[in-house]
Amino acid sequence: MSVTSDFYLARVAQCDWEANETDLTNVRDRCLRAKAAWQTMADRVLKGEADRKQQAADKAAHQERPFG
């Protein structure tokens, strides 16, 4: 199963919302740590998606060039 960046970004948003909604410092800190971890994972997936898109564009540009 492949997880998209949307999944990770949704978790980031959820953690952010939970951190803002709580009055408990320890819960807020836990949510912010989780948010940072999810954001790191989202950044990795976003980079991978961008790299794949660039590779596809490079391949398409290479195939368009005539031989010779």
Image (cartoon, helix red, strand yellow):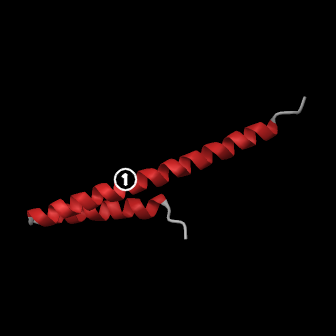
For this rendering, which residue is in front, 41 or 60? 41
Tell whether 39 sits left or right of 55.
Answer: left
Is 8 situated above or below 68?
Answer: below
What residue is shown at x 35% (from left), y 64% (from top)?
A: 11
For this rendering, which residue is in front, 44 or 54? 44
Outermost residue, top direction?
Answer: 68
Instruction: Find residue 48 and report its horizontal and vertical position in percent.
Output: 53, 50
Is 61 situated above or below 11?
Answer: above
Instruction: Find residue 15 and report its horizontal and vertical position in percent.
Output: 27, 63
Tell whether 31 sits left or right of 40.
Answer: left
What residue is shown at x 22% (from left), y 58% (from top)?
A: 32
- Secondary structure under tag 1 reads helix
Instruction: Find residue 51 and report its horizontal and vertical position in percent.
Output: 57, 46
Q: Quadrant of residue 39?
A: bottom left
Circle 1 packing at 10 Å, graded few (<14), some (14-19), many (20+), is some
The number of numbered badges drawn on the structure is: 1
Quadrant holding the N terminus? bottom right
Quadrant holding the C terminus? top right
Tell whether 15 sits left or right of 23.
Answer: right
Tell whether 15 sits left or right of 41.
Answer: left
**Residue underneath mark 1:** 40
Instruction: Find residue 52 and report its horizontal and vertical position in percent.
Output: 60, 49
Outermost residue, bottom direction?
Answer: 1
Dot 1 amino acid type: Thr
